[in-house]
Amino acid sequence: MSGDELSAPRPAGAPRHSLTVSVLAAAAEHTDCTFSNLALAGRVNLEQLFGGTRYEPGTGADPLAIKRGRLFEEILKKDDYAELLNLLYEQDAAMGAFGADARIARLRDIPVSSGRSGLELRAAATRVELGKIARKAWDAPTLIDGAVIRARIAGEIAYFEADGLAAASNGALHVVEAKSFPLIDGRCDPVKLGAACVQAGLYAGLVRAQLREDGLPGETVSDTGFIVLPKNTRLGRAVLLRQNLTFHIRRAERLLSLASLDVGAVERIHDHPFPSEKTVAAERIDALSHLMDQAGTQYRPECLEHCAAAKLCRERAYRAGRVALLGDQVRRELTGIDTLPRVLELAGGAEALESEQDSARELVRARRMYRRALKEARP
Ligand code: SF4
């Protein structure tokens, strides 16, 4: 079975979602978790699957924030992208020439012909425009409006709509990601900026994969992406931040290669597919818990921000006393040790496995110091 043919077991009843860049971006935070990879590959909608159970995830995106985002995009697109093009011109000296004769490829205007979806047609047109940029054609676009990238995820075709892709006339393509959180006095929310970079990295990874599939150099996509934000809380003026996306692109490429999902894990869980959302809540949770055992998870506190399964995973981690509950730093300091009861055993002098020896030495030393300090503190 080749990676491209592989797909996660999925009964007809398991709720599905369409693959969007936000879904991919969330999954990009957990590429080491096989359960999460299987859910992604099977397009299983975990939010819905946990709905109505005591592990139901919190509410989704704030509708006001969505409205603000749409408004900001409209401002950027007004008068043929005048605001965004102005910001790109300012990059000229450092980034190449965006030029005064900007050409915008308007892919949203493509008429939908019978038998083919709008996304399919836009994806084909995006390929043509990307080819022009990579070949440095005279009519290469400065901006692609309504770009759609086609990708094969775990054997199925998915279409991803980009906010905008910008290209300099020197043949380098820069991903543009517009977000509506403000930059005030040169500062913005670092968590939101990080999330925007994750998304931009994913677009870059998708475009590179598309170019390579077409026999063109993936390196046409620059490691430098542009995040466009409102200047101050009012949306009227925008500012462009140049961001190095090298790390995010590398991680996105790793995620996208999950088309070659762990065959062993798929086979292990073949008899225990994702349950239907119609299954009684308690049985659904039992089935999901069983799947987690079979596939494997890598819980850490950050999961709570990105994964709909996090509340169940956290409880399972508590029950098992997993070291991962204490966060990445502690996990690194206790390398090789999986659970807190084992930490206590080793600190008390239990014989360590080879993989536990470095951490065990430190634990014994720490315990000795602690006991000495207690003794000295006694009156
Ligand atoms: S919450 Fe659980 S299933 Fe989700 S990514 Fe984390 S470890 Fe994996």
Image (cartoon, helix red, strand yellow):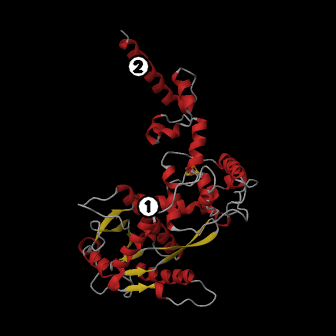
Q: Which residue is mark 2?
A: 369
Answer yes or no: disc 1 within 8 Å of ligand 1: no
Quarter of image, res 52: bottom right
115 lies above or below 333: below
Among the two numbered marks 2 and 1 on one chain, the one whose residue lies closer to the N terminus: 1
- Quadrant for the N terminus, please: bottom right
Q: Which mark is residue 198?
A: 1
Q: Secondary structure at mark 2?
A: helix
Q: Which mark is residue 325?
A: none
Question: At x 53% / y 68%, what residue is drawn?
Answer: 20
Question: Would you say the residues marked 2 and 1 are in contact, meaning their CB atoms lie under 8 Å apart?
Answer: no
- Quadrant for the C terminus, please: top left
- The span from disc 2 to disc 1 (Cα, nearest Å) is 43 Å
Quarter of image, res 88: bottom left
Image position of 332 (left or right of 2): left
Q: Is residue 108 visible?
A: yes
Q: Is residue 221 visible?
A: no
Task: Between residue 115 and residue 289, name the one nearer to us.
Answer: 289
Q: Amino acid at mark 2?
A: Met
Q: Amino acid at mark 1?
A: Val
- The picture places residue 47, in percent across and down from the top left corner, at 59, 59
Task: Between residue 306 and residue 255, name the one nearer to us.
Answer: 306
**Residue neighbourhood size for the residue with mark 1, other residues' Cα within 10 Å, grouped as few (<14), some (14–19), many (≥20):** many
Q: Secondary structure at mark 1?
A: helix
Question: At x 67% / y 47%, what residue is drawn?
Answer: 289
281 lies above or below 204: above
